[in-house]
């Protein structure tokens, strides 16, 4: 496994230790990365390796994920995740940064952008919009994300083979790295996923009283919405609605990619973000 030039840091909120990776290069433009449900901060490692010499990159482990602490089962709501992100941002003294959020992390990022527009220079939403496609009631769209529901394995190789079948478009090293950082040993000598099993049982984190379409319509931050050509979470129709609803939203489809498009097509994902973050000529 290639060594990762990132350092672990912790911020405590509500007695929960919130872990995040810091790739260094302080003083450069900050980029904050927020993963999706059942994933972890290390899913952004490829992006970090590509750009840690140009940006100050931080990647969060959201509560109940990766190396962050677990919460009570009724404390995995969008407001909880947002307050965690805010706590890390404040503790690190960040301002005028780019916020990149995938799936659940994208919903958290929408809420953050709505409440703190003065903090953000750019916003990237990775395969997530303010709505969901029409699916039968009870469909768990998160199950097509990178990490499947918990089960145990007799070895890392077995877990990698299992995840590789789910991520058939992804480069093998990306799958191996995700497993290496996203799995933990159990007391009986086997391995299981790191995230809190309560995340499987919890309902969608957005409260019924929150209208996300109204929320994103008020976000004036320059925004890039990326979605995978094979995604079942973002349809072309939803992407078009986001572009119409958000004042400054551009859309890019990443070909041959599913929901975890940064894992399926890491080069295309990175190139898309790089184009979006390129300095704009003065008017």
Image (cartoon, grey):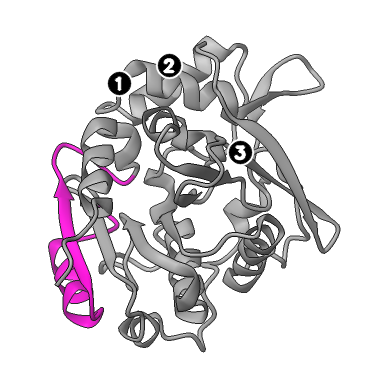
Is 49 above or below relative to 157? below
User: What residue would you read off at disc 2?
Assistant: 161
Q: Secondary structure at mark 3?
A: strand
What's the CA distance linking mark 1 and mark 2? 13 Å
Total labels drawn: 3
Q: Secondary structure at mark 2?
A: helix
What's the CA distance linking mark 1 and mark 3? 23 Å
User: What residue would you read off at disc 3?
Assistant: 21
| Relative depth, front residue between 28 and 106 | 28
Is 80 above or below relative to 15? below
Residue 14, position as x, y percentages in the image: 82, 64
Query: Is residue 236 a member of the stretch shown in magenta?
Result: yes
Residue at the front extreme, as displayed: 282
The residue drawn where x is 66% and y is 69% is 83
Q: Which residues are magenta?
A: 232-259
User: What residue would you read off at disc 1?
Assistant: 171
Q: Are marks 1 and 3 in contact (CB under 8 Å)?
A: no
The residue drawn where x is 13% and y is 62% is 236
Query: Is residue 234 a member of the stretch shown in magenta?
Result: yes
The residue drawn where x is 42% and y is 27% is 49
Q: Secondary structure at mark 1?
A: loop
Residue 67, position as x, y percentages in the image: 70, 38
Between tags 1 and 3, which lies in front?
3
Label 3 CA crowd tier, 10 Å (few <14, some 14–19, many 20+): many
């Amino acid at each position: 496994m290639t060594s990762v030039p990132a350092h672990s840091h912790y911020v405590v909120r509500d007695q929960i230790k919130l872990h995040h990776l810091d790739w260094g290069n302080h003083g450069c433009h900050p980029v904050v990365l927020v993963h999706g449900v059942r994933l972890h901060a290390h899913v952004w490692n490829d992006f970090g390796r590509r750009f840690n010499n140009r940006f100050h990159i931080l990647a969060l482990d959201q509560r109940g994920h990766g190396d962050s602490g677990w919460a009570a089962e009724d404390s995995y709501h969008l407001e909880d995740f947002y307050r965690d992100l805010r706590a890390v941002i404040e503790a690190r003294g960040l301002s005028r940064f780019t916020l990149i959020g995938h799936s659940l992390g994208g919903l958290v990022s929408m809420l953050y952008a709505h409440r703190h527009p003065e903090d953000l220079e750019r916003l990237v939403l990775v395969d997530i919009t303010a709505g969901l496609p029409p699916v039968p009631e009870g469909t768990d769209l998160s199950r097509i994300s990178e990490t499947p529901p918990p089960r145990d394995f007799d070895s890392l190789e077995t877990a990698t083979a299992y995840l590789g079948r789910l991520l058939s478009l992804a480069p093998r090293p990306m799958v191996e790295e995700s497993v290496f950082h996203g799995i933990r040993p159990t007391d009986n000598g086997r391995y299981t996923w790191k995230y809190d099993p309560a995340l499987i049982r919890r309902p969608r984190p957005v409260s019924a009283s929150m209208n996300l379409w109204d929320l994103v319509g008020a976000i004036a931050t320059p925004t890039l919405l990326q979605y995978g050509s094979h995604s079942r979470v973002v349809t072309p129709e939803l992407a078009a609605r986001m572009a119409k609803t958000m004042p400054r939203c551009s859309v890019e489809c990443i070909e041959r990619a599913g929901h975890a498009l940064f894992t399926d097509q890491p080069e295309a994902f990175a190139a898309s973000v790089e184009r979006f973050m390129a300095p704009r000529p003065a008017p």
